[in-house]
Amino acid sequence: MLTGITFPTDAATPVTGTPVERLEDARLLTGTGCFVDDLTRPDLLHAVVLRSSMAHGRIVAIDASAALELDGVVAVFTAADVASDGAVPLIPIRLAPFPESQAFRQPVIAVDTVRYVGEPVALVVATSRAIAEDALELIELDIDALEAVASTDAALAAEGDGVLFPGTGSNLVLRYTAQMGDADTAFANAPYVRTERFSTQRHSAVPMETRGLLAEWDAEHGHLFLSGAAKVPYFNRRALAEALGLGMDEIDLLEQDVGGGFGVRGEYYPEDFLVCFAARRLGRPVKWIEDRREHFMATNHSREIACELSIACARDGTILALAGRLDADMGAYIRTNGGVVPAKAGQFLPGPYRIRDIHVDVSIVVTNKTPVGTYRGPGRFEANFFRERLIDMAAADLGLDPNVMRAHNLITAADMPWDAGKLVPYEAETSFDTGDYPVTLTRCLEEIGWEKNKHLQGTVIDGLYHGIGVACFVESGGAGPRENARITLETDGTLTVAVGSSSVGQGIETAHAQIAADALGLPLGKVRVLHGSTTLLHEGFGTYHSRAVIMGGSAILDAATNLKEHLVAAAAKRLGLPNTRLVVENGGVGSGDRFISLAELATDGPFSANGTFANTTRTYSYGAHACHVAVNPQTGAVKILDFVAVEDVGRAINPLIVHGQAIGAIVQGLGGVFLDHLVYDSEGQLLNASLADYLLPTATDFPNVRAVTLELHPSPTNPLGAKGAGEGGIVAVAGATANAVAAALAPLGVTITDLPLTPPRLWQLISDARAAAEPEH
Amino acid sequence: MDEIDITLTVNGTAHILSVSPRTTLADALRQGLGLTGTHVGCEHGVCGACTVIVDGAAMRSCLMLAAQAERHAITTVEGLGRPEALGPLQAAFRKHHALQCGFCTPGFLTTLHALLTEEPDADAERIREVVSGNLCRCTGYVAIIEAALEARAAYGHQEAEAC
Ligand code: FES
Ligand code: FES
């Protein structure tokens, strides 16, 4: 039946760029979502991991006989069992693959040596988790202690037994220099130079859902299924296929709802292999759910970097050069993220400023602590804190308003594209795409009321010291090389979108559905987005580096373009018109008064088309954060009176989601400034592996946070014009907040150079400064 | 360990199930009854994801044995609405984008439902104080408070008269 134009029922008003409510919410709000631990299977077995309680040692014996006698225990696997299939596989490096890192990769289960508290030594499999946990207690594990190194200083000084990988001769994985211009000469000729040491503390993402996996081996077809995937399922499939000796077509990773990622979840971890190994060995489904205690010692840590930073300036505040040394504590092994955390800290040291002469030395060091990976804004959060603190210090020395100094040095629209050089050894040269960086600073200063409030710096009101701090940032997004998608117009007139991106709870189902709905002119309610699972597409790249909208969204656009060609061809047949006269619009295909709705056309379907978006250039969002604090000098407690983040994201597909990302990121960042801290003793024991001891922000901690999202300068790197939007909210939090606290306490002579700013630590700094100020007797 | 038979009344329906005496209420709901909306984030009473309502009070189901819940009326997130018929708190959460990954969400909804049932006039400060026992890593809490304030109307909150 042909319809004669005018008001096609499926026509929809565009939804891209509008704050539509999320499609995933109805299920998540009613307990009808499906997270990995919600899955169950007939004949299911449960695995728990025996972990090293020693930071460094030689495994002398593992006696599991008593555990195996316990009713319900099915198997206990150690490195010896894994080795019976060949060499114990190593965790491959996915990012920042410095060749020197290869010798520091982690075996999927400890072989002879343990190198951090929490390293897997054995896997116990039983008919219930409780029984498996009981059995854990019955395993006798005998480890001879070796010297443990729990800091980069100790690691670099260590010899003999204190060297984690004796074959390498040293705990220094590598040291490299990245530079642009001629920093040495610039420093030698500069009228003003200042050098300071800074550090950021070890902490991590701590998503509310711990990791979890369910592996099933289909013996009849020789096929392995692993549920609980996130972030990078296709990479993990390749890694698992290699480790298990399976073909890529013999293994699939399946994604469920995911309770937060923030970088740590979904990487290829030892347990991914062990659970699959056990399921195949035993021919039964095996589930492993990480408990919170092991999460703290097993899932990637991040952020532990020490920095010595020098700035050279002209008297008017022009930044002439920057030179830094970064020492990164990587924990015991180089896992999938390679050297990306320190490398990005090095790259983003100069930040959004017009600095031409840069010299950065980066040292990557192993210690007997949990291995490090990426956590939201990896390296950027740290580098921003180091640089923005130093800018405030330099401005004070030079007698300048720090924000006038910032504005004076920020990259402007006239400088774009800005050649950001090659500060990452394993990456090509890069340039900042678009933007007018002073605009976001100006807006941020307006929001925080800088001009009217700056007289408050260091003043005492009701016993509290007030301070306002600002920090500017630039943040990359949209990692390549490509992403894939397929769109299908089903016979019932709905659209199914399959995409290689993954969800980690950030709302991509909605954002991707918005893009697809508009591309085909259909209402949002007709679109279903499937993502993450390797069963959907031949290849995908997942979700990291703020790439899901930029790469996945653009791949969806490409698939839509290709699908439209099919639809035009089909409509041409139906309407008896040449293809060239037809266009897809308003929920149908037509020309003049001849029109067929997609719903109608779909009955000839389904119609399906693939799309790909390939791109290796990055997007660069940018902005500024400002913070107003009041510090209690008696207790060291800091109250955030106001915090505002301004970011230009190029284009927001869903402003509601972008705003939520920004607010969530700010509060996570404030946790990183004041609360989050993975504390180790000198023996490499993790002292606070519980949510009662490791503090996270709660609803009463930081109520006054705001975010302003701007869409001023779209990125030319992708057809959506989008830039990353999930990480900018965290990048400058430490810089702005620490500057505010430093400004508040400046009259007392307190200098802020190290995180976290816990009350006891601030109290100590205040007392020390007061004692130093007392005249000697 | 020998199993024991218990009767649990959940969302208005009585269920008989056999559990080992050490089974927590959270595990009994999730594994015994398939009510997987109740989430487990820490198993030691800190994160609040496992919160359910027991005789009107918000309780941590990871800290309670299933056997202790006999003869009590339990409400889980599944009892607060359905996907096609969201309850007022759920609808307000969706409108205000008070959830991202949704893992913590059932615990916030049950905690807030218990609060607003008792105190429909709770102000922002009171709401913040009560949910400060629940952790969320995604939202930064701002939208959760906004959603709760809006949902109060459905629990009988009267807007103060403007003068
Ligand atoms: S699981 Fe019960 S409070 Fe965290
Ligand atoms: S929405 Fe993800 S933890 Fe709260």
Image: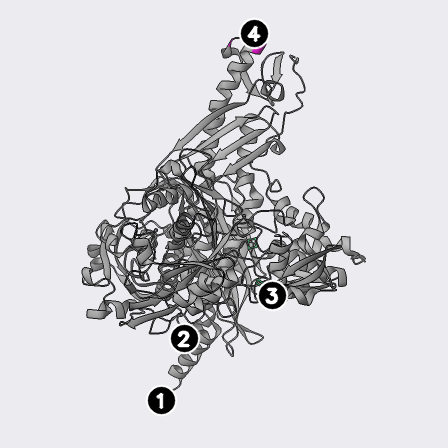
Q: Which residues are magenta?
A: A574-578
Q: Main secondary structure of the magenta part?
A: loop
**Residue pushed farthest bottom?**
A777
Q: Which residue is mark 2?
A: A749
Query: Dot 4 surroundings within 10 Å: few (below 14), some, or many (20 or more)?
Result: few
Marks 3 and 4, how far apart at CA: 75 Å
The N terminus of chain B is located in which quarter?
bottom right
Q: Secondary structure at mark 3?
A: loop
Q: Secondary structure at mark 2?
A: loop
Q: Earlier in the sequence, mark 2 or mark 4?
A: 4
Which disc is residue A776 wearing? Answer: 1
Q: Nearer the viewer, mark 3 or mark 2?
A: 3
- Residue type beneath disc 4: Gly
Rate crowding at label 2 as few (under 14), some (14 to 19) or many (20 or more) other CA atoms within 10 Å.
Answer: some
Q: Quadrant of residue A586?
A: top right
Q: Which dot, 3 or 4, sits closer to the camera? A: 3
Q: At 49% across and 54% down in the image, what residue appears?
A: A45
> Per the image, is A390 magenta?
no
Confirm whether residue A738 shows in the render: no
Residue A252: % across, % down: 43, 40
Q: Which mark is residue A576?
A: 4
Question: Which amino acid, mark 1?
Answer: Glu
> Which quadrant would residue A401 be assigned to in this image?
bottom left
Percent position (x, y) of residue A463? 56, 76
Name the residue nearer the viewer: A279 or A596: A279
| Residue A686 screen position, x and y as percent | 40, 69
Give the SS element for disc 1. loop
The quadrant where ligand 2 appears is bottom right
CA–CA distance in space, label 3 to label 1: 74 Å
Name the residue beneath numbered marker 3: B2
Q: Does label 1 lie on the same chain as label 3?
A: no
Compare residues A508 and A14 and report the one nearer the observer. A508
